[in-house]
Each structure stands twice: as C-alpha cells, then as structure tokens.
C-alpha cells in the first residue's frame, strides 16, 4: 500500500519520535526557541522535547498515545450519565446485580444515601421555586438579555439585604421593648429629670389639626411619627430585666449598628469576588476582544425581535467603539509634544470647571439645609405647599444637582479627548462622587448646626450640642434621611408616570420629525444603578437614627422593581451602550462598596465624636455612644476584660495590620500567578490553532502531489462529488485532522 512519506514513519515506530513533519509544527519550533538548548545537551533535550510533543500535541495520530475516556463516576445517578437509553438500562441492571451481593448493612446505607440525595434534590427544587421574582427575572432575561438582567438581580439583592438588616434591627432593638411592654419584666429608663439638657418637648400636635398637617407629618417624619418606633428618640430604655437575665439596650443598639454594616460588607465582597476574578484575568488583547465580540458576543437568551435588533446594533456599536479606541491610541502615540501640552492644558481647565460646578452644588446644598433648619426651628406656618417645600428643600436641591450635573459632565467630557470606554467610566465616577458627596454635605451642614451654639464660640455648649434647637438631634438626622428616601421614591415614580410614559405615547403616535429625533427612552443601566445605590447609602446612614428605615427601604425597592419592569416593557428600550452581565455585576458591587464606605464615615463620627442627646435615646447616660463598650467591658470578669483590652490595644492592631498586609500580598501574588497561567493557556490554544492550520496545509500539499502522480482519470460524477463533500463535512468537526491513506495502487514505495 502506498502512503505519502510526509504522514508516515520510516521504521514503523512512534510517529511522535521519528516523523520529521512534527518537528515542523509551530508549537514545537516555538518550544525549541524558548528553551535555547546548549550545545552539550542538544540531542538529549531535543529527543525529550520531541517525546513530550508526541505525547501531547501529536497524540492524535499516534495509536499508542490515544487517551481513553474516563469511566463515569459510579456514585452518580444513572439518569445523569451521558449515555444512550440502552446503555443506561444495562448500567441499571448491573447496579441491581451488584446490590444483591451486598450485606444488609451496606444495602441500608445505600438506600439511606439514595433517599437523602432525592430529598436534597427535591428541597433544592422547592427552594428554587421560592426565589423572589424568579419568573419575572427569567422573562426579562428572555426578552432583553443578561445585561438588563444584571440590574434586576442587583435590585433583588438589595431587597434581600435590607430585609435582613430590618430583621437584625427588629430582633435586637425593637422586639425586646415590645415584649417587655406585654410581660412581667420591667424596664429601667435612662432619663434624668431636673436638668436643662433633659427637656424634650413633645412634637404631637394639640387641639384642632388640619388634614394637610397630617400629610406633612407623614412625609417629613414630624408630629405623631417623631415619637414612635420609627426614630431614635423613642428608645428611652437602658436595661430590660427579664426573669433570668438583663438585656442591655444601649449595647445591643451599638452592636446591631456594627453588625448590619459588617454584614453588608461581607455580603457585597462575597458577591463581587467572582467578577473581580474575571476582571483580574481578562485579556487585554484587542484582537481577542474582536474575536469574542464576533464569534461569542451574541446573547442567546434574547427571544424578543426588537431586543435582538438592538443587540445587533449594540454589537456593531461595540465594534465601532473598539476601532475608535484603536484610532485614538494611534493618535495618542503620534502626538507631538506641543499637542500633548495643549490637550493636558484643556483637561486641566475643564477639570477645574468640573470642580467649580461641584463646589457650587455643595454650597447650594449647604445653604438650603441651613435655611430649612432655621425655618423648621421657628415653626412658621404659611400654607401647605410652602411648608412642604421648606421641609424638602435640601432633598429638592440634591435631586436637582443629581439631575443637572450628569448632563453637564456628558458635554464637558467630549472636549477632553478620551477614549469612548474611558469616557463612560470617568463620567460615571463623577456622577457617583456627586451623588454620594451630596449626602455628606447634607450631614456636615446638619452637624455644623447641631454642634454650634449661639453663645461665644470659645465656650463649649453646656450640653455638648445645641440643645435649644435640637433637643434630640439624632431624631432630626433620622428625619432628614427619612425625607431623602421618601423624596427619592417620589421622584422615581413621577419620572416614570409623567416623563417616560408621555414620551412613549408621543414617539409612538406622533409622526413629526422632532418626535422621531427625540426617540424612545433608553433604559440606561448605570444611571438606574446609581439611583438605587444612592438610596441604599441613605438607608445605611439612616438606620442608626431610624431603626425602621430598612423596612421602608425594602418596601421601596420592592415597588421600584415593578415600576422598572413596567417601564422597561412598555416605555423604554435597551441602551445602545449595553453592559455585559459579568462586567456590570462587578461595577454595581464596586459602586455599592463605595457607598458603604461613604456611609460608615458619618455613622462612625456620630458614634465616637459627637455628644449623644441627653433628652432621648438609649445613650443618655453616656457622653458619646461609643462609651457603652468600655463600661460593659470593665464590668466583665478580669480575665475576659483583660483579653478584650489586649485585642483593642495598639500592639494587637499593628500586628493584625501586618498579618493582614502579608495575607493580602500573598493573595495578590497568587492572583498574578493565576493570571500568568491563564495567559499561558491562551498561548497554548493559539498555538494549537496554528498547528491545525499547518497540518491542513501539509495535507492539501500531499493530496496535490498524490493527484499529480496518478494518471488522469475520468471526472467524478456529481453524485460522487456530493458524497465526498458530505463525508469531508462529517469529519470536519473531529478533534484532529483526518489523515486518510491513499488507495492501494500497483506502484510501490521507493
């Protein structure tokens, strides 16, 4: 039988050690180039390298190196095996025969294991059916893909997080007080009468009260709501004595605050680990990015026709954006020194202008807060609308700033000559800073009023704070956070009803050119995420001053889910700049982590620095809220208290910081090693593709030489050519290249 010498070994030995073709593979040549063998060990290293190449790259053609598939796991159920029905029946019969040889103890263990596995599977099915909004999120994923799905999944995560925080605050703070009021236990109140600082006048309206005043109280948290479970000032309990133990309410209040902040941190970090890993090892090669978008960029969860068209246009937009980034990179590389100086000067001027805009917004928030607090202190009643505007003036100014500044940022960044991807990220970071810093400015304005007395500035306030204007300043801060959350919900609902819905009607039923140019409202995922992160930051800050605020936040996000679902289905279309589910999830959680860090600062300052109110709350007997911990620790047994003091000492803090840094460096090094492994695997995949292309070229050359040696034959009929094409198509998807031996002829090999 004749065979081409290129594809056969001379001595019948293993192809991987003798065949000169395999020495020409790009992967083998690259391996030799990397190793650079010395003159002494060249032959030995070449043979060992060739043997390794034969066992890995060329194992497809060597009959002795073909790996057999592993046997399936015998512990897996038969229905989960990738086999045909006949093979599954035979496997089941074999299992039955094997069980007959077991003793009773082994049969009982096997039956218990099988019953437990079935119970676990049934439990998982039941729990998956109880997942919140499971059907709605699947419907959104089917119509609009995984990008928009990530927003609604993020919203569901916040609903669950706020609900857990509410259960924590309710179980540790509210429930003991509710139980003691309906039991034989007694309470120790913390109010110390006879002092000027303990005077806390009631805010409940007396006499004839108009209806609109109840509406103002409901929207602002004043009046009948101020002295309820909703706000800090209601919890005037120090100890709750039950029959067997004593419950320390101030300690529970402080520990509950630390607990919900720490729980939020752990939960966010846990969810962001997967996205961080993917972003850490992602390839920055632009060619691979193009390949991913072209060959694997389609979202097969999309079933809606309009969403499919938008996805197609978004992929086209992403490709154009990548090409534009390549053009800008080339433009940056070709810039002269004069052009670089000009663009840096423009960016400096524009960033100074952005800082000026932010400073102006923060000053407006500060002045609006001062004016609102002064009017509320004087209690001047004009009419319903003006009173409501004065109550919500800081919230109105913050909302206007959050609406106007992103539009200005979008215009300004066009003149800074950044790449399109960096423009999006930089604009979003500016918007995040504006939204979160506005809350900080509001709190700073409140604290400047709380800690400032009208007496001489050199003399501290007699109560540690301005008791004349703020007898219970924690409740006042809680009211401001309550108003921010209520107003944020009103704005989201009003925009949906009065802006997006009329815009949908105008664009759909009006044929004028202006309406077509205006277009349908886009469901911008980053802006919607910033809205709910802003609201969640308010919830984290306000929970210390209003323990029931997480419950309000849970209800708010529960309603917002359906509002956003309706507006997505009816009023909006997906954005032309979509976010992938993997990158968007990490971005959402990163912004949420920034909001959590922003929330921890004012809460920590109010606990450790600002004097607690002497007329309300559980910390009346303490100068600051933090002092409850040292006092409780000093009352513990000597050994335990010394251990806790040692943990809180500076020596332990420094040691813990050093150990944490070492662990962090270790994990960073481990992540870098994983990234290098991923890069090597990518290179290996690329080299495998080059090997296949090289072998296909050699196969074509061998077939051409074989055809030139044979005498000219009659042309093949159409049926035979079609059959030959079908045969080659069937074998095209094999893992290796099919090396077909030529037919036997009378000629012999030389």
Image (cartoon, rainbow, N blue to C red):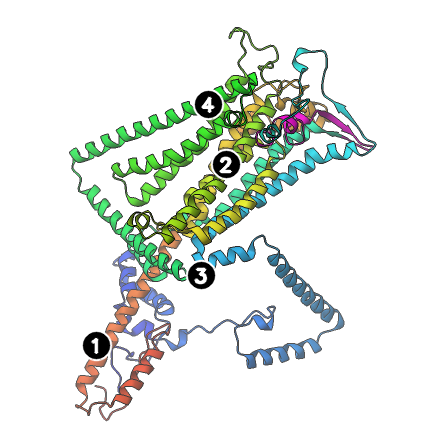
Q: Nearer the viewer, residue 12 or 396?
A: 396
Is residue 1 in view? no
Badge 2 marks a residue whose secondary structure is: helix
Of circles 1 and 2, which is in front? 2
User: If you read the primary sequence from the N terminus, does the residue marked by circle 3 or circle 4 appear first?
Assistant: 3
Badge 3 marks a residue whose secondary structure is: loop
User: If you read the primary sequence from the N terminus, does the residue marked by circle 3 or circle 2 appear first?
Assistant: 3
Of circles 4 and 1, which is in front? 4
Badge 4 marks a residue whose secondary structure is: helix
| Left-right relation of 653 to 738 | right
Q: Nearer the viewer, residue 633 or 218?
A: 218
Of circles 3 and 2, which is in front? 2
Residue 107, given in percent of the width and then of the height, sits at 72, 71
Residue 237 lies in magenta, yes or no? yes
Question: Which mark, residue 488?
Answer: 2
Q: Are marks 2 and 4 in contact (CB under 8 Å)?
A: no
Residue 362, given in percent of the width and then of the height, sits at 41, 25
The residue carrying mark 3 is 301
Q: Are marks 3 and 1 in contact (CB under 8 Å)?
A: no
Question: Which mark, residue 701?
Answer: 1
Residue numbers of the magenta segment: 218-246
Residue 646 lies in magenta, yes or no? no
The residue carrying mark 4 is 368
Please say if 122 is above or below 508.
below
């Amino acid at each position: 039988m004749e065979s081409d010498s290129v594809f056969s070994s001379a001595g019948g030995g293993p192809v991987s050690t003798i065949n000169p073709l395999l020495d020409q593979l790009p992967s083998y040549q690259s391996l030799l180039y990397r190793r650079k063998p010395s003159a002494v060990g060249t032959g030995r290293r070449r043979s060992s390298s060739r043997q390794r190449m034969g066992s890995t790259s060329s194992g497809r053609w060597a009959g002795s190196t073909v790996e057999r598939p592993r046997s399936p796991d015998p512990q897996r159920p038969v229905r989960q095996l990738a086999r045909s029905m006949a093979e599954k029946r035979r496997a089941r019969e074999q299992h039955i025969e094997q069980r007959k040889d077991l003793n009773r103890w082994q049969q009982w263990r096997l039956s218990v294991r099988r019953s437990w596995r079935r119970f676990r599977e049934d439990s998982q099915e039941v729990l998956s059916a109880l997942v919140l909004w499971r059907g709605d999120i699947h419907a959104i994923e089917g119509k609009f893909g995984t990008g928009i799905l990530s927003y609604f999944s993020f919203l569901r995560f916040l609903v669950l997080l706020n609900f857990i925080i509410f259960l924590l605050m309710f179980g540790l703070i509210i429930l003991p007080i509710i139980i003691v009021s309906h039991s034989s236990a007694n309470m120790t109140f913390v109010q110390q009468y006879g002092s000027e600082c303990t005077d806390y006048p009631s805010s409940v309206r007396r006499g004839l009260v108009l209806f609109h005043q109840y509406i103002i109280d409901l929207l602002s948290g004043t009046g009948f709501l101020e002295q309820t479970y909703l706000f800090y000032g209601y919890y005037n309990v120090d100890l709750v004595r039950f029959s067997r133990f004593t419950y320390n309410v101030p300690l529970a209040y402080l520990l509950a605050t630390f607990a919900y902040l720490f729980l939020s941190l752990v939960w966010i970090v846990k969810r962001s680990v997967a996205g961080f890993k993917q972003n850490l090892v992602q390839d920055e090669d632009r060619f691979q990015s193009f390949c991913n978008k072209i060959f694997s960029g389609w979202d097969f969860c999309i079933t809606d026709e309009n969403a499919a068209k938008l996805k197609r246009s978004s992929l086209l937009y992403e490709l154009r954006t990548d090409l534009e980034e390549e053009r800008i990179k080339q433009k940056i590389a070709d810039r002269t020194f004069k052009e670089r100086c000009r663009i840096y000067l423009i960016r400096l001027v524009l960033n100074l202008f952005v800082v000026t805009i932010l400073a102006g917004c923060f000053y407006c928030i500060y002045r609006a807060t001062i004016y609102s607090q002064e009017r509320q202190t004087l209690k001047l009643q004009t009419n319903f609308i003006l009173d409501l505007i004065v109550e919500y003036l800081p919230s109105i100014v913050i909302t206007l700033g959050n609406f106007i500044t992103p539009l200005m940022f979008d215009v300004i960044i066009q003149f800074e000559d950044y790449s399109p991807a960096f423009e999006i990220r930089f604009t979003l970071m500016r918007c995040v800073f504006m939204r979160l810093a506005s809350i900080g400015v509001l709190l700073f304005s409140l604290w400047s009023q709380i800690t400032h007395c009208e007496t001489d500035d050199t003399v501290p306030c007699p109560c540690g704070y301005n008791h004349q204007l703020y007898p219970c300043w924690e409740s006042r801060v809680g009211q401001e956070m309550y108003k921010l959350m209520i107003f944020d919900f009103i704005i989201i609902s009003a925009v949906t009803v009065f802006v997006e819905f009329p815009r949908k009607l105008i664009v759909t039923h009006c044929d004028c050119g202006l309406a077509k140019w205006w277009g349908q409202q886009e469901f911008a995922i980053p802006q919607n995420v910033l809205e709910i992160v802003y609201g969640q930051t308010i919830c984290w800050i306000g929970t210390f001053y209003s323990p029931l605020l997480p419950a309000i936040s849970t209800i708010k996000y529960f309603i917002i889910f359906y509002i956003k679902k309706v507006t997505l289905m009816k009023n909006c279309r997906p954005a032309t700049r979509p976010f992938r589910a993997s990158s968007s999830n990490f971005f959402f959680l990163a912004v949420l982590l920034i909001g959590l860090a922003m929330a921890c600062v004012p809460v920590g300052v109010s606990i450790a620095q600002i004097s607690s109110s002497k007329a309300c709350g559980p910390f009346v007997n303490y100068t600051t809220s933090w002092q409850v911990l040292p006092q409780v620790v000093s009352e513990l047994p000597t050994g335990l208290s010394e251990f806790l003091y040692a943990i809180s000492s500076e020596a332990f803090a420094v040691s813990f910081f050093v150990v944490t840094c070492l662990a962090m460096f270790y994990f960073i090094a481990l992540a870098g090693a994983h990234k290098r492994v991923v890069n090597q695997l990518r290179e290996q995949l690329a080299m495998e593709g080059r090997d296949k292309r090289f072998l296909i070229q050699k196969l074509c050359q061998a077939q051409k030489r074989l055809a030139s040696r044979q005498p000219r034959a009659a042309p093949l009929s159409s049926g035979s050519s079609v059959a030959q094409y079908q045969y080659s198509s069937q074998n095209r998807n094999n893992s290796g290249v099919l090396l077909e031996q030529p037919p036997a002829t009378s000629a012999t090999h030389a």
